[in-house]
């Protein structure tokens, strides 16, 4: 399937805060990074202690149970940066050396309540995810990249915001990289306008066997979706590649492959993307609709309790950017207020495990 069978909109480059370049944003760290102050750290630690004293389960934590009078304004401003601005943010300096994994999860979840509502991240109903190498093969059609140590190409997740909390970094590698999908769109339009119809038409992609109610084992959604003055993007090339293995999947055309190779090459250019390391206690948040994220391959420590381990949240935001129907009808489902709801499989209750599964 390519763009020839579908009427295409008149295209023009998109300007605005989502259209950033990594080489320029690297010099503007104060706009997308916040170092916790002593007062903010103290109230986060106190909020964690109060939750533990009450014996609350992770999913029972809300803003009222996790008051942050000093940090709340920071999170409010960060939220607008994520949804209406460049679409990424890093919070640094949270001392976690003496914490348990449960305390880290409490802090992450509590901070997340100021940003959005958690969504299921897989067919197991995990609203608290774990990015950890489980020894799976990245080439396995049913394996998700976050369960491996492989390099993950630039991609998006199925929610308004994705958040990562660094519990343990890798022995080597595992660096985070992000890129503006709006900038990738603009560059692709400038360099190869003839390939844009393919990128604006739906691609057939697997659901990895995690099939929501009323959906097929595959989904069809474009890479770029111009909508309401913005470029909304959703891209997971591994899902497109593995979708080719499903019975009846239409074979990718040469033009589609060329178009995907083009956007991958643009995103990989040093001046386009922005790299950042992960330190213990770091929290990175990204708006999936305007930002692609990736990581390098990594080497783990031998000791199980020292291996790379990130906690993850997928968050739905009622006031997120306007989305085309592709995102909540063709791809995933929708929350009661119309936002992408992650991956919800019938009969699977939502849960927040404290270990990778």
Image (spheres, helix red, strand yellow):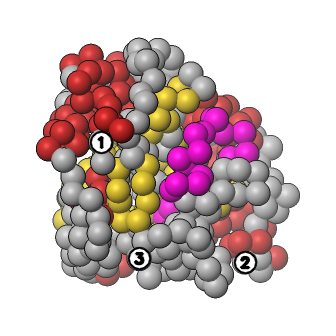
How many other residues sit within 10 Å of disc 2, few (<14), some (14-19) or many (≥20)? Answer: few
Percent position (x, y) of residue 284? 48, 47
- Residue identifier under label 3: 209
How many other residues sit within 10 Å of disc 1, few (<14), some (14-19) or many (≥20)? Answer: many
Residue lying at the far bottom in this picture: please name it.
347
Q: Quarter of the image for the C terminus: give it.
A: bottom left
Q: Mark 3 or mark 1, which is nearer to you?
A: 1
> How many numbered discs?
3
Picture residue at 78% right of the left edge, 61% below the top: 62
* Residue 318: in magenta span: yes
Residue in front for this viewpoint, 200 or 124: 200
Picture residue at 57% right of the left edge, 76% below the top: 345
Q: Which residues are magenta?
A: 311-331
Give the number of the disc on residue 57: 2
Of callouts 3 and 2, the N-terminal one = 2
For marks 2 and 1, give the CA distance: 47 Å
For marks 3 and 2, give the CA distance: 29 Å
Question: Does the residue at mark 3 contact the one at mark 1 (Cβ under 8 Å)?
Answer: no
Q: Secondary structure at mark 3?
A: loop
Percent position (x, y) of residue 321? 63, 35
Percent position (x, y) of residue 187? 28, 22
Left-right relation of 230 to 49: left
Q: Mark 3 or mark 2, which is nearer to you?
A: 3
The part of the image, by quadrant, that contains residue 19 is top left
How many other residues sit within 10 Å of disc 3, few (<14), some (14-19) or many (≥20)? Answer: some
Of callouts 3 and 1, the N-terminal one = 1
- Residue identifier under label 1: 2
The part of the image, by quadrant, that contains residue 120 is bottom right
Q: Secondary structure at mark 1?
A: loop
Q: Secondary structure at mark 2?
A: loop
């Amino acid at each position: 399937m390519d763009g020839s069978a579908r009427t295409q909109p008149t295209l023009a480059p998109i300007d605005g805060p989502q259209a950033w370049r990594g080489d320029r944003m690297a010099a503007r760290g104060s706009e997308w990074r916040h170092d916790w102050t002593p007062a903010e750290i103290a109230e986060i630690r106190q909020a964690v202690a109060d939750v533990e004293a009450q014996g609350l389960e992770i999913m029972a934590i809300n803003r009222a149970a996790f008051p942050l009078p000093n940090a709340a304004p920071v999170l409010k401003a960060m939220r607008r940066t994520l949804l209406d601005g460049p679409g990424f943010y890093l919070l640094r300096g949270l001392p976690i050396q003496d914490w348990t994994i449960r305390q880290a999860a409490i802090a992450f979840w509590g901070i997340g309540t100021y940003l959005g509502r958690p969504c299921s991240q897989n067919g197991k109903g995990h609203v608290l995810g774990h990015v950890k190498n489980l020894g799976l093969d990245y080439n396995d059609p049913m394996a998700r990249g976050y369960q491996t140590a492989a390099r993950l190409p630039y991609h998006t997740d199925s929610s308004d915001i994705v958040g990562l909390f660094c519990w343990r970094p890798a022995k080597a590698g595992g660096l985070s990289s992000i890129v503006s999908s709006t900038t990738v769109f603009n560059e692709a339009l400038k360099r190869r306008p003839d390939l844009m119809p393919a990128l604006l038409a739906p691609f057939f992609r697997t659901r990895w066997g995690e099939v929501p109610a009323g959906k097929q084992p595959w989904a069809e959604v474009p890479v770029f979706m111009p909508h309401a003055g913005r470029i909304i993007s959703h891209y997971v090339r591994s899902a497109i590649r593995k979708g080719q293995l499903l019975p009846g999947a239409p074979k990718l055309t040469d033009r589609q492959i060329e178009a995907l190779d083009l956007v991958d090459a643009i995103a990989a250019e040093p001046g386009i993307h922005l790299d950042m390391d992960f330190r213990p206690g770091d929290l990175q948040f990204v708006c999936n609709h305007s930002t692609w994220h990736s990581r390098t391959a990594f080497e783990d420590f031998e000791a199980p309790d020292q291996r790379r381990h990130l906690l993850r949240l997928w968050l739905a935001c009622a006031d997120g950017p306007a989305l085309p129907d592709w995102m909540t009808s063709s791809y995933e489902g929708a929350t009661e207020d119309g936002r992408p709801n992650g991956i919800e499989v019938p009969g699977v209750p939502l849960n927040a495990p404290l270990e990778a599964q």
